Every structure is written in structure tokens, then in C-alpha cells.
Image (cartoon, rainbow, N blue to C red):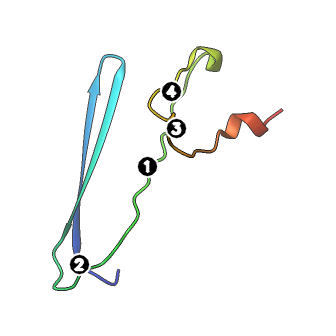
Amino acid sequence: WFCNFELLLRISLNPGKLTLIPRVRNTDNKAFSFMFALRNYLSVSDISEVHIEGLETLDYFDNLMHKK
């Protein structure tokens, strides 16, 4: 890596809820920018019963729309 930093990922599992909270701390003497992405691969028994909320104002890619 070109800069020094610390990454803390807090994972909370509760009934019906998975919470992931990333925290990045710059420990270097210069500023830097970064992007952070999480990919969750969760096994579900019936995809038609899955509902995702909170993405109404965001751009996203639904991979299931392109599978046959």
C-alpha cells in the first residue's frame, strides 16, 4: 500500500439483521482517498422472498436481472 492506515470492521449479527460498519483511520502523514465496498454473499432458500430496502435513491446493479 502507498499509505499507512488502520481498518476496523465491526460485524454485528442479530436475529434477522446483519450490520457491517467499516472504519478507516489514516495513520500516515499525508492525506489519501480511497473507496470501500462490501460484497455479501448470503444463501437464501427462496430468492422471491428477499426484499432490499434503502436503495431507492442509489444507483445499483441487480445481477439476477441478467440471468436466465
Residue tagged 3:
41
CB within 8 Å, label 1 to label 4: no
- Label 3 environment density (alpha carbons within 10 Å; few <14, some 14–19, many ≥20): few
CB within 8 Å, label 3 to label 4: no
- Label 1 environment density (alpha carbons within 10 Å; few <14, some 14–19, many ≥20): few
| Residue 29 found in image quarter | bottom left
Q: Please state which amino acid type lies under the numbered disc 2.
A: Asn
Disc 2, SS? loop
Disc 3, SS? loop
Q: Residue 42, relative to residue 63: is it above or below?
A: above
Disc 1, SS? loop
CB within 8 Å, label 2 to label 3: no
Q: Please state which amino acid type lies under the numbered disc 3.
A: Tyr
Residue tagged 1:
38
Q: CA distance from mark 2 to mark 4?
A: 35 Å
* Closer to the eye: label 2 or 4: 4
Q: Please state which amino acid type lies under the numbered disc 1.
A: Leu
Relative horizontal placement of residue 30, taking residue 64 as reference (left or right) = left
| Residue 10 found in image quarter | top left
Q: Residue 36, relative to residue 52: is it above or below?
A: below
Choose the circle earlier in sequence order: 1 or 2. Answer: 2
Residue tagged 4:
52
Q: Please state which amino acid type lies under the numbered disc 4.
A: Ile
* Closer to the eye: label 1 or 3: 1
- Residue 44 on image: x %, y %: 56, 22
Residue tagged 2:
4
Q: CA distance from mark 3 to mark 4?
A: 14 Å
Disc 4, SS? loop
Q: Tell me what residue is drawn at x 54 percent, y 27 percent.
A: 43
- Label 2 environment density (alpha carbons within 10 Å; few <14, some 14–19, many ≥20): few
